Image (tube, grey):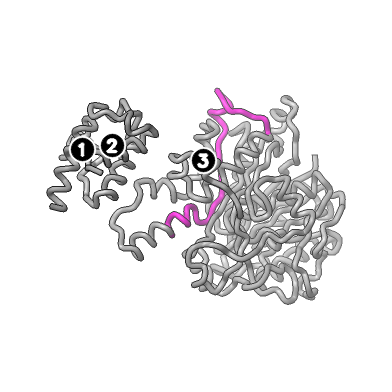
Amino acid sequence: MSVQDKVIEIIAEQAVLEPGDVALDSTLEDLGIDSLGLVESIFAIEEEFDISVPFNANDPSESDFDITNVKSIITGIEKLIADQKG
Amino acid sequence: MYRVVITGAGSVNALGHDVPNTLEAMREGRCGIGALDFQDVERLSIQIGGQVRGFEAEGRYNRQQMSLYDRFTQFTLAAAKEAIEQSGLTFSGDEAAKSGVVLGTAGGGVSTWDANYRSVYEEGKNRVHPFVVPKLMNNAAASHVSMEHNLKGPSFTVSTACASSNHAMAQAFQMVRTGMAPAMITGGSESMLCFGGVKAWEGLRVMSKDACRPFSANRNGMVQGEGAGIFVFEEYEHARKRGADILCEVIGFAMSSDASDIVMPSKNGAARAMAGALADAKVNRDQVGYINAHGTGTAANDKTECAAVADVFGPHADKLMISSTKSMHGHLIGGTGAVEMLACIMALRDGIIAPTIGYEEPDPECALDVVPNDAREAKVDVVLSNAFAFGGMNAVLALARV
């Protein structure tokens, strides 16, 4: 499975949706994922790819990790994997 | 001062997953103590306990809830649901604003601590689930009860080791009695039956490898249990006006500190708590028909408790009944006073006194009527429920038939 597919699977599970219902331009709000849900998703992503995601819930927009939508999340994760595991 | 009654009861424990099953087991003198079953149990020298069996948490709670609910919270919510449904109360408006949740627990989310410590120390993992803190915090159970049932009044968690539930219920009683709240959800819960939880207790060398035999001359220690007991305490007129089914009345309490030893109980501290409860309830000692004992089955507790009862009750000590249901459900530590409250309700409401099972040999230092092995039918008007904890913290509740 590609990084994109895996991330969509993780986000879909968190949102209690089918992966097919998660679009690349969906925002977390669109998917009904609240702040606690986001933190849980990040944990699942870190576990899955064995990476460390720089995310501080106090100021989500400040961190290097762009959570604007599913596409930006996937891009961010691909970069982290390359930086940390490449 | 208002009168306070109990209008709902719920429980999950080794004898059953609800109150009717628990009471039936108590009537039949059934033993809920058996072989413990969890990871690394083979490494323990104590392998028995009152473990809750077959409690299908996954069937009751959704995925999101399961990630937030330690086992002690799972038990609490199931018991709270039973109690509140029985009471017929739903909380909204002013009633919701003023009613709260006060629960006892000694350890809180012990199995969450245990599993996550194992994960980071033993398995070398570098991250734990984000919800570990809200899951293990001692107030988690009370918080989820408040969230689930819209209780917006004063809520908190009380921790006094083995007396936690009694202290919590005494606080809740006081809050309704003084008019601070029209109703309070109260009781307690505990779930420490995991490797770390039991291993920690082994060091004290007070646990039995074979059985819990309170008051028996051949008793050799306590046996841990787990579970929850939750009650609805309600102001009497409030209950009467809506035609609620009243289980019994809470008539008084006392709390005392031994100020003596960190683990050994004091006869004086226990006696002051019992005498204090009688005084607070304004009843004479000879009105008490039954005492649900702390009765852990340790050499120290049982003889100290009997000596204290003899002191407080004088000649009447030989006429009352005193049994320990820990012989059946184990010692639920912070949750024990709450589950034992069920035996008190059964005594008052059903006229059935739960037995002390496992009783084999009379002990001259515990020469009271301990209702050995078989339940007994008897009409009693007033009962006491004792809890004498590590750290010398004692809390005794007095209840009456209504």
Start-end of magenta stretch? B87-114
Instruction: Decide if residue B34 is in sight here.
Output: yes
Q: Are dots 2 and 3 in contact, CB under 8 Å?
A: no
- Neighbor class of circle 2 (other Cα within 10 Å; few <14, some 14-19, many 20+) is many
- Which residue is painted at 29% across and 50% down in the image? A47
Q: Secondary structure at mark 3?
A: loop
In terms of depth relative to the viewer, which is nearer, B356 or B34? B34
- The residues bearing labels 2 and 3 have C-alpha atoms spaced at a distance of 25 Å
In the rendering, at what x and y percent does residue B2 appear? Answer: 69, 34
Quarter of the rendering occupied by the N terminus of chain B: top right
Going by the numbered disc 3, the residue's amino acid type is Tyr
- The residues bearing labels 1 and 3 have C-alpha atoms spaced at a distance of 31 Å
On screen, B280 above or below B263?
A: above
Q: Could you say which disc has been placed on residue B61 in the image?
A: 3
On screen, B363 above or below A23?
A: below
Q: Are dots 1 and 2 in contact, CB under 8 Å?
A: yes
- Neighbor class of circle 3 (other Cα within 10 Å; few <14, some 14-19, many 20+) is some
Q: Are dots 1 and 3 in contact, CB under 8 Å?
A: no
* Mark 2, residue position: A8
- Neighbor class of circle 1 (other Cα within 10 Å; few <14, some 14-19, many 20+) is many
In the rendering, at what x and y percent does residue B357 appear? Answer: 76, 64
Which of the chains bears the disc numbered 1?
A
Which of the chains bears the disc numbered 3?
B
In the rendering, at what x and y percent does residue B273 appear? Answer: 67, 57
Which of the chains bears the disc numbered 2?
A
Judged by depth in the image, the label closer to the viewer, 2 or 3, is 2
- Which residue is painted at 33% across and 42% down in the image? A40
* Mark 1, residue position: A74
Query: In the rendered structure, does residue B102 fall within the stretch colored magenta?
Result: yes
In terms of depth relative to the viewer, which is nearer, B339 or B248? B339
- The residues bearing labels 1 and 2 have C-alpha atoms spaced at a distance of 8 Å
